Amino acid sequence: MSSRKTDSKKKKKKKEGISTPPMGAGLLVFYEEETPGIKVTPGFVFLFTFGLIFTVLILWFLVPPS
């Protein structure tokens, strides 16, 4: 009989705990609000990064470090 009491207490504790959103367990948060500032797409960041790396490599070959 005591095991039934502890089982019901365990079930109540689970229900009283913090619930998480059904998808992603609350790890990702998406904001719907527009913020002021420059809007940068992932494609631009990708191209800019590789462009910067390419520029540094070209300059490194043309003007070798002393």
Image (cartoon, rainbow, N blue to C red):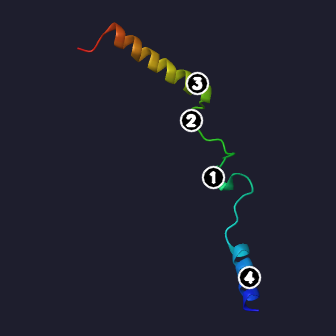
Instruction: Check the picture and name the quadrant holding the N terminus.
Output: bottom right
Marks 2 and 1 close (CB-CB < 8 Å)? no
- The location of residue 10, given as percent across then percent down, is 70, 79
For marks 2 and 3 on the same chain, the one whose residue lies earlier in the sequence:
2
Residue 54 vs residue 11: left or right?
left
Name the residue at the left extreme.
66
- The location of residue 23, given as percent across then percent down, is 73, 52
Question: Mark 4 highlights which residue?
Answer: 7
Asked which secondary structure carries label 3, the reply is: helix
Q: Please tell me how crowded label 2 is: few (under 14), some (14-19), or many (20+) other residues with Cα within 10 Å.
A: few
Q: Please tell me how crowded label 3 is: few (under 14), some (14-19), or many (20+) other residues with Cα within 10 Å.
A: few
Residue 21 vs residue 43: left or right?
right
Q: CA distance from mark 2 to mark 3?
A: 15 Å
Res 44 label: 3
Q: Is residue 14 above or below residue 47?
A: below
- The location of residue 41, given as percent across then percent down, is 62, 29
Residue 37 vs residue 10: left or right?
left
Name the residue at the top extreme.
62
What residue lies at 66% left-to-right and 55% top-to-bottom?
26
Marks 1 and 3 close (CB-CB < 8 Å)? no
Q: CA distance from mark 1 to mark 4?
A: 31 Å
Marks 2 and 4 close (CB-CB < 8 Å)? no
